[in-house]
Image (cartoon, grey):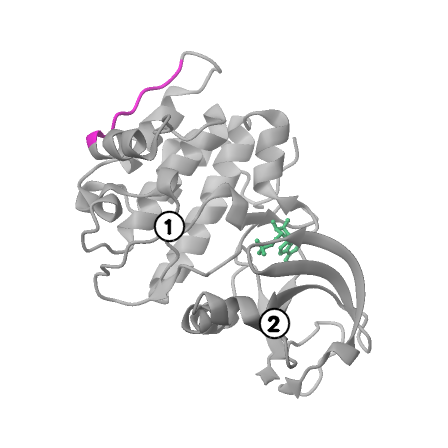
Amino acid sequence: MTSQFLPPQKQRKPKKEWSLQDFEIGKPLGKGKFGRVYLAREVQSKYIVALKVIFKEQIEKYRLHHQLRREMEIQTSLHHPNVLRLYGWFHDDHRIFLILEYAHGGELYRELRKTGHLNEKQAATYIASLAQALAYCHEKHVIHRDIKPENLLLDHEGRLKIADFGWSVQSSSKRHTMCGTLDYLAPEMVENKAHDYAVDNWTLGILCYEFLYGVPPFEAESQMDTFRRIMKVDLSFPATPHVSAEAKNLISRLLVKDSSKRLSIQKIMEHPWIIKYADPSGTCSN
Ligand code: AMP
């Protein structure tokens, strides 16, 4: 299979057939549903990447060929500082290997769990980065549909990278398929109604809340209760920790049941909370 991996240090032929021999494999970085991810170095250029190993047996068992193919094609076509690069892929008899940009900072989720919640500067910087990445994806007719802290990685400078395009779709029309993770689902997806780009805007509202309060807004004991709370938009802001009125205003304007009335990506980027707190460089430390 061909790939488009072009290490910046050494511009090679634009297309290359990669194989495992091209990489030195380092420490494991993590384990996902369908395989493991390793730190790796391309032998010639010494370029550091993350190599995701997926077992074909698993893909066949769950009939995910089309989804994986779609994920790979979409992610390869996206070039944005806040979207994790997929440089290319190759396979052997049993495994598929994805050559991914290495995100040194790991999962944003781990950061969030470690500190409980983020401060307003961090939260606003991540939301602004997400909004920019989504504006870019939407322009390319890609709806991510599964944005959640586990799918957000950080590079060595703390810059946010959207990863895992497994549930994304490339489309300019309304979609009907049910997918995504419960707590982050927009009402139109809970109801399995047609949905469009505005599902990602809803998710930004959920994430903004979770960044600042440490838990998603509609969390409940059972799935049914979460569904009910989403459908009612049963939103409340705990008294602690202290969160500014501007942040609550942004969240309330994203968590709107009628998708056509949700704040647009452009308006998110111009929102007073983002202007006040987001670091324009897209990087932030604690
Ligand atoms: P996944 O199979 O994509 O869910 O990945 C499993 C775990 O590996 C993730 O939760 C991350 O902690 C880690 N990981 C995945 N991709 C990368 C990457 N590009 N850079 C660094 N760590 C990664």
Q: Eyeballing the image, is 51 above or below 209?
A: below
Ligand 1 lies under 8 Å from the Cβ of mark 1: no
Visible residue check, residue 281: yes
- Residue appearing at x 46%, y 41% in the figure: 127
Numbered disc 1: secondary structure: loop
Relative depth, front residue between 254 and 220: 220
Q: Which residue is mark 1?
A: 180
The span shown in magenta is 232-238
Badge nearest the viewer, 2 or 1: 1
Query: Does residue 241 belong to the magenta stretch?
Result: no
Q: Quarter holding the N terminus?
A: bottom right
Where residue 87 is drawn, which disc sits there?
Answer: 2
221 is higher (above) or lower (below) than 164: above
Q: Which residue type carries mark 1?
A: Gly
Residue 224 point in image, percent of width and height? 28, 33
Q: Residue at x 43, y 69 (%)?
A: 63
Is 191 placed left or right of 181 in the picture?
left
Q: What residue do we see at 58% from left, 46% from top? A: 281
